[in-house]
Image: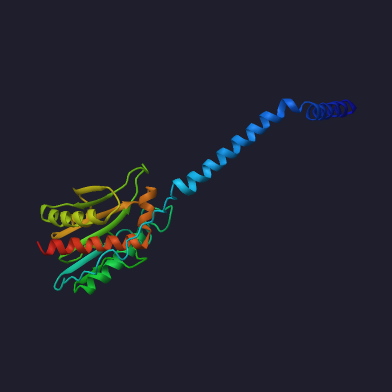
Amino acid sequence: MDSLKSIFKKTAEAIGYFLKYKKHLYVKPLFFIIIALGIVLISVYVYKNVIHEPEELITMDFTGNEEAVSYDFSGTTVALDPGHGGDDPGAPSNYGEDEDHVVYSIASQLESQLIAAGAEVIMTRGEDETVSLDDRKVEADLFISLHSDAFDDPAISGFTTFYTYPNQEDFGKHLNAALDEHSLLYNRGNQVMEYQVVWQLDYSGVLIELGYLSNEFDDYILNQEEYQGEMVTAIMEGIDSYLSR
């Protein structure tokens, strides 16, 4: 212990001696270091506040950009099928609601707009209701099944429209084109797939994968109320385009 104290004492004395009697060795270099540091700090300040304008925060704004559009779907019966539900929550979400609630929210908004446009709407399930695939078969003019699935690969993103029979392809094309105008996601196209809710129909029906909750960005935007409204707008446009062809 005494040896340590002696070492510290000698070190302190040496430092004191150097600072007191060797100023000519460190005063000038220290002066230039302080000047250089000041120049750097002033340069950074000028760049950030004078030369380079601060970047604006990027936000997604879907409201107030379009005029309200009125549709007349009188005489048309539309079946809306929010995927999963009840005992089957569907794909899990890391950001907000799971698949069953995401697609039910969109389906409910779509139901309101379709009714306002004069259409008759059939919902295949209630908000927390468990319904088998067989029981989702209903008689209507148009059938739309809504999903937001998941993949093992979280990099997979995008929306897709699926149909089974040739007489359903055109309806899928119109919905896909409208979604392409409004979605922020990659368009994976209008594809043939034998999903039961579609192949058990003999009229125009499609299954729409609005995105994949296993992808962080898809998950985020599909849980945004504004983006859900944008998907409703797209589907309404797709229906109108198909009926007006």
In the image, farthest residue toward the right: 2
For the residue pair 242 and 37, the one nearer the viewer reads as: 37
Tell me if I can see residue 131 in this picture: no
Residue at the image position 36 percent from the left and 57 percent from the top: 60
- Quarter where residue 83 is shown: bottom left
Q: Quadrant of the C terminus?
A: bottom left
For the residue pair 44 and 170, the one nearer the viewer reads as: 44
The answer to whether 214 appears left or right of 39 in the picture is left
Q: Quadrant of the N terminus?
A: top right
Where is residue 76? Give x, y as percent.
15, 70
For the residue pair 28 and 146, the one nearer the viewer reads as: 28
For the residue pair 78 and 186, the one nearer the viewer reads as: 186
Position above or below: 14 against 197:
above
Residue at the image position 15 percent from the left and 57 percent from the top: 171
Number of on-image labels: 0
Residue at the image position 19 percent from the left and 67 percent from the top: 78
Position above or below: 176 against 37:
below
Tell me if I can see residue 70 in this picture: yes
